[in-house]
Amino acid sequence: MTTDTGSERTGPILHNSGVGPSVRPSPAVLKARRERLLAAIAIDGIDVAIVAPGADLRYLLGDSFPSFERLTALVLGRSVCLLVVPEMELSAWSTVVAQSSLEVFAWADWQDPYAVIVDLVGTNSVVAVSHELPARHLVTLQEAVGQAAEWRLNSAVTSLRGVKDDWEINQIEGAASAIDDVHAAVPGLLRPGRTEAAVAADIQHVMRENGFTDSEFIAVASGPNAANPHHSANARTIERGDLVLVDLSGRWHGGYFADSTRTYAVSTPLPETARAYAALLRSFECAVSAVKPGVTAQQVDLAARNELSEHGLAELFIHRTGHGIGLDVHEDPSLVRGNEELLRDGMAFTIEPGIYLPGRFGARIEDVVVMTNGVARQLNARPHELLVV
C-alpha cells in the first residue's frame, strides 16, 4: 500500500507478528475466520467489508477497543486487509497487531482517515458495513465515496458468528459452568426480610469471585415484580410465599457470555402456582427436545408455546423462546415465531420460556444449549425444578 494520495496520509504502516494473551483464539483460528468472511462476502457480491469496533471485530481479531469519536475500522476485501486506527490509541491495539499479519494504518488527528478507506473502496464498489459502525462515520464515508457505490448492512459476520467453533464452545461451556456456581449460592441469599437490591449486590460479588468481568443483568424479581420479564431489582422486601425469579448474565473472563434463569420459592408454593410451574418446566423440556437438524428457529418457539397452550397458559408467555449467545449476550439465531432459519450444529442459544401473571408472580427457566451432533446439549447443570428455600 502506498502513502501518496493527495490527502494527508503519511502515518505509519505497521507489519507485526507474535502471540497474544492465552484467553483468546490462536492467530491461525482468527485468520481462518477472516478468510471465511472473505468467502462469504464474495458469494454475496460484496467487494469490501468495513467492520467497526465491537463484537464483530473481536470475533475477527481476537479483541476490540472503543473507537470513541475517532474512526477505527477493519477494511477487508479481496486485495486488502487493513486496520485503520487512531495513532493515539494504537498502544491499546498492540497485542492484536502483534499476533496478526494485519497491515495497520495509524492516523494522526490532523490526517483524514476517510480518504484512506475511499482509496481502498473505490467509487463503484459494493460495500458492506457492520452494525456497530456509528452513523457519523457511515455518512461521512458515503459522502466521500460518492453515489456510485452501493452500501449494505453486513450480515456476513453475524452469520459466521452464529455457528461457534470449538474454541468458542469451550469458552461458552466455561461461562455456563461458572454461572451455575453463582446460582448455587443464590438459595443462601434469599431470605424473607431482605430486599431484592441487597440480594443482587451479593450476587454481583459472587459473580466476580467466579470469573465474571462484568454483569450484563442481575435480576432478582420477587412476588408481583417477577411478572415483569425485565425487572431488575429494587427496594421491595422479599416475603414468605414469594416466587423469586433470578436471571443472571455476564461476560466471563474469556469474553463470552453466560445467561441462566432459575425460579425459587420462599416457602412451599400454593398448589395453583406449583401446577403452573410444572407446565412451564414441561414447556422448557419440549423446546429442548425440538432442537434437531432441519428444524427452524420458529419451530422451537412453537414447541414451547404449544405445550403451555395445553395448560391454558400460552397467553402468559409474552417473549421469544430464546436467543443466540456468544461474544454478545443476544445474538442470532432468535428463536421466535416467523424466523425460518434452520438450526445447525455449532449454534449456541438459550431456551427460556416464561409465564407472567400481572400483579401476582412470574417464573422462567433458562439454559444455554449448543446444538451438537444434531441434538441440544444443555450447558447448565443446575436443577430446573422449583427450588423451595
Image (spheres, rainbow, N blue to C red):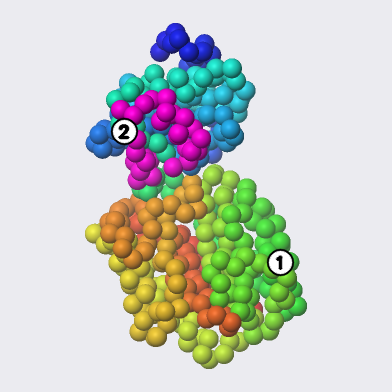
Whichever of callouts 1 and 2 sits on the residue coming sooner in the sequence is 2
**271 or 46: nearer the eye?**
46
Sort mark 1 into few (<14), some (14-19) or many (20+) by Cα contacts within 10 Å. some
According to the picture, the residue beneath numbered tag 1 turns out to be 197
According to the picture, the residue beneath numbered tag 2 turns out to be 150
Quick check: is 142 in the magenta stretch?
Answer: yes
Badge 1 amino acid: Ala
Spot occupied by residue 210 in the image (x, y as percentages of width and height): 63, 54
Q: Secondary structure at mark 2?
A: strand
Label 1 vs label 2: CA separation?
50 Å
Q: Which residues are magenta?
A: 131-160
Q: Is residue 357 visible?
A: yes
Q: Is residue 375 above or below residue 101?
A: below
Count of numbered labels shown in the rendering: 2
Q: Is residue 170 visible?
A: no
Q: Is residue 70 above or below residue 339?
A: above
Q: Is residue 381 above or below residue 207?
A: below
- Which residue is found at the position 53% from the left and 69% from the top? 229
Relative to residue 358, is residue 41 drawn left or right? left
